[in-house]
Image (cartoon, helix red, strand yellow):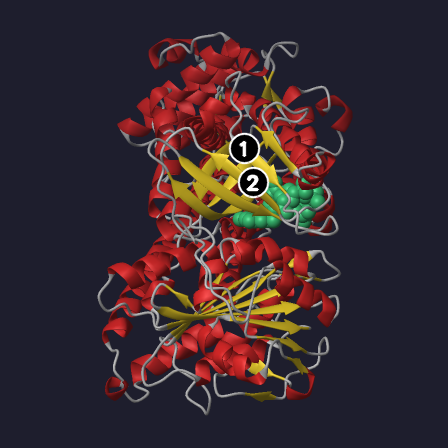
Amino acid sequence: MVPSSIFLCSVILIIRAVRGEGYQVYTKNPASNCVEGINDALTEVTFGDIDPDAVYYTGLCNSVYHTTSLALSTMKWCTTQKQKDKGWKLMNHYCEEYGSVSLPSWEELSSKVNQSNLIEDVNTVDPTIIGTVFNSTIVLSEEAWWAGQHTDDVWTTEEGYHHGFGWGLYILVGLAILFGTLNRLFAVFVRSYSASVSSPQEVSPFSHKSRWYTMYRKHIEVPALFGYKHSQASAWGFLSIPTRIQGLFIFGYVALNVIFTSVGYHTFYENVYWYGQKDTQIIRYLSDRTGIMCFYNLPLLWCLAGRNDVILWMTGWSYSTLNLFHRWVARIAVLQAIVHSAGYTWLERGYIAVEMKEQYWWTGVIATIVMSLLIPFSVRPFREKFYELFLLIHIVLALVTLVTCWYHVKIWDGAYDPWIWASVAVWAMDRVIRVIRGIVLTYKALSKSGINTKATIPWSSSDQKGLIRLTITTSIKIIPQPGQYYFIYTPYSLKPWENHPFTLASWTVNANDTTLNFLVAPLKGATKRWQKKILKNQERQIDMRLLLEGPYGHTNPVEQYDKVLFLVGGSGITSILPYLYKLKLISIQVPEPTIREIRVIWIVKDQNYAKDVLDNELREYVDMGACGDIPTKVDLYVTRGGANGQQDLVGSLGYDTTESSPTSASSSPGITSTPMIEKIESQNINEPSTDTNNDGELSTSNSDMELGSSASKEKITKSVGLTIHQGKPIVKDLVHQSVNGLVGSERLAVSACGPSKLMDDARASVCEIYGNGENQVDGKRIEYFEESFCW
Ligand SMILES: Cc1cc2nc3c(=O)[nH]c(=O)nc-3n(C[C@H](O)[C@H](O)[C@H](O)COP(=O)(O)OP(=O)(O)OC[C@H]3O[C@@H](n4cnc5c(N)ncnc54)[C@H](O)[C@@H]3O)c2cc1C
């Protein structure tokens, strides 16, 4: 957060500094307001020698009566030399800049004053005098001078508020990032502290501190804002409900914007700009405030949309979290733009046709319309159904917004350009880093012979539903980490810009490059096209060239827990495979690793999803019933197809209850084999299991379907790691089982990736378990990690 706001502020300040302006937030009213106020009060009346056809400032600055009145009133009311010098300099600047005339000196003007014609003590804000034409020099009354100066003082104060509140938003964002960073550091501290308290004897009673921490996790950090849906869409699919902590940030941000647009308005009757019209004054200040704050929000909006972003790097927040914030900042900014435009439309209601000819006006109209369109074109159902169209529309409309905003504020001589350029800078930085990442990683794929990918759909898939396996060789050697995902591009296609995120499933580090494996569930767009292409080939295997951009994502420290429960659905298995590999390495390399038990719950619609992964990345763990030295159990839940299907799966995997033979090896979640299968457990879909056996396994004894003889079953049960079930598990039961299996101060990590409902179930179950009641544990002992495949 801090670096991010520093970055934003720096961009703005640098741009302003380069322009030689320097940034100024008005904390007190400038001395020049005295003369400027007098000038404004004088314009409540007019003078006979002002050329009605002249440009406003040319007329005023050429008028002897106006300029002498200005000089004499200045001498009378502006008592300090600073007020006089600064004020006269400013007025001269206006005359030269906007009227192409220089103001004469006071001495010269004094000589022009006709004393017999001089009228003193004229109250130009007196309703009976407003608009009077004078053919003489006048000197303002105290009331008129006060009204003029006060008008300018209020104006500059309002300007100060507009910008001050804008910076206030940046400070809030800075604090939020600071909080996020500290929260991350605190979590690291809690984890390492808890890891050091490892033996059952060391379990401390439910202390005051841990009670607070548990309550914080149960009620603030982990749960959905309200109800239980977070990953699933709410409100007929239109709304994504944040977690409570995200909700707090969003609430704080929205509330601050509302407060900042509602306070700090000073109206008074004698205002010489809008005499007697307090409502007009309010509308004008509100319109300016919302317009300016909308500009302050723009760079933030772009910052939160980027893949390469300091906020992500600092806080470790996921891209989907920032994306959520991006959407809320966008809603606020659009609302501010609408209020700004509506306010000006009301203020200029008599002159709309004239205004429409002004560039600042029509570009503002377009900017507001375009920004407003971005909202309906970004709603969740639209994003989910037409992601590519959503992206295209989003980018085009965002570009139009920036260009039209730039023209809209051109009349301010560049004063508001820094916010536009800051947004452009953030956007450009993200895009440049994307290109660099892509080129560095897979530049060889751009050459003539740059085939770098094998795409296969394994033979085992009897129908077309199997996962696609993409094996991509990078151009340079990299050492991947669990939790990383890459965006995949098809460079020589009709849409080379199209890219999709996929999580790294496994890898092999070679001498000069790295081979990365991705498992892709074919859906309706690019993935469907890949599927069709592969299936056209009899071998169900094709060579391709794909570009990789990444890595993104972060690694969850599951190795710091005693037990891990992975809850995955469908292609979500991808996300846990690298963790299993890492845990295997840790168990081999670390003398006394913290982690002691791994349980994988994998729910698939049909067996074809599972076959390839069970045969490759999971094979070793399933065969050995262990990940390195860590006891590991895989529970596969097949929700469609009957028990015959499961038997086919077992058969096609080559499992044999009596034999053991190694098959192959790989350097990441690898394959060695002592093939065995424990049993197939069949269970009615949605029907809760009724009991647990000694191993904490879910079973419904009357529907178990065993493979092999009872003797071999016993032997197999002890030595292998795969249980196949038919139907869906009850996530809550699985989490409770794992928690019940904790001994002493053991700690559990629950990691979920898969369908939205699965993740919401897992989140709700973990929340339920926090507490000091029966079957509950304190906040340090159970951690919830979520990998989401959508944003
Ligand atoms: C961080 C992350 C990691 C992922 N890892 C995997 C993985 O390892 N294996 C896997 O099978 N799937 C993974 N996905 C999901 C995968 O990105 C989408 O299924 C894929 O983009 C669908 O492409 P499509 O054109 O066939 O989609 P469509 O059939 O057109 O759309 C299907 C769904 O995918 C979403 N989607 C489409 N394009 C994108 C995109 N560019 N970015 C984000 N969402 C998109 C759509 O909103 C829609 O909800 C991951 C998603 C994310 C966000």
The residue tagged with tag 2: helix, strand or loop? strand
Read off the residue under disc 2. 470
Position of 544 relative to 55 (above/below): below
> Would you say residue 561 is visible in this rendering?
yes
Q: Position of residue 395 (x, y in %)?
A: 62, 32
The residue under the point 53% across, 60% down is 251
Q: Residues within 10 Å of mark 2 (few under 14, many from 20)?
A: many
Marks 1 & 2, CB-CB < 8 Å contact: yes
> Would you say residue 280 is visible in this rendering?
no
Residue type highlighted by circle 1: Thr
In the image: residue 101, left or right of residue 655: left
Q: Position of residue 596 (x, y in %)?
A: 34, 73
The residue under the point 50% across, 34% down is 548
Q: How far is the residue under mark 1 from the one under mark 2?
A: 7 Å
Between residues 559 and 206, which one lies in front from this camera angle?
A: 559
Between residues 587 and 18, which one lies in front from this camera angle?
A: 587
Numbered disc total:
2
Does the beta carbon at disc 1 come under 8 Å from ligand 1? no
Outermost residue to the front: 659
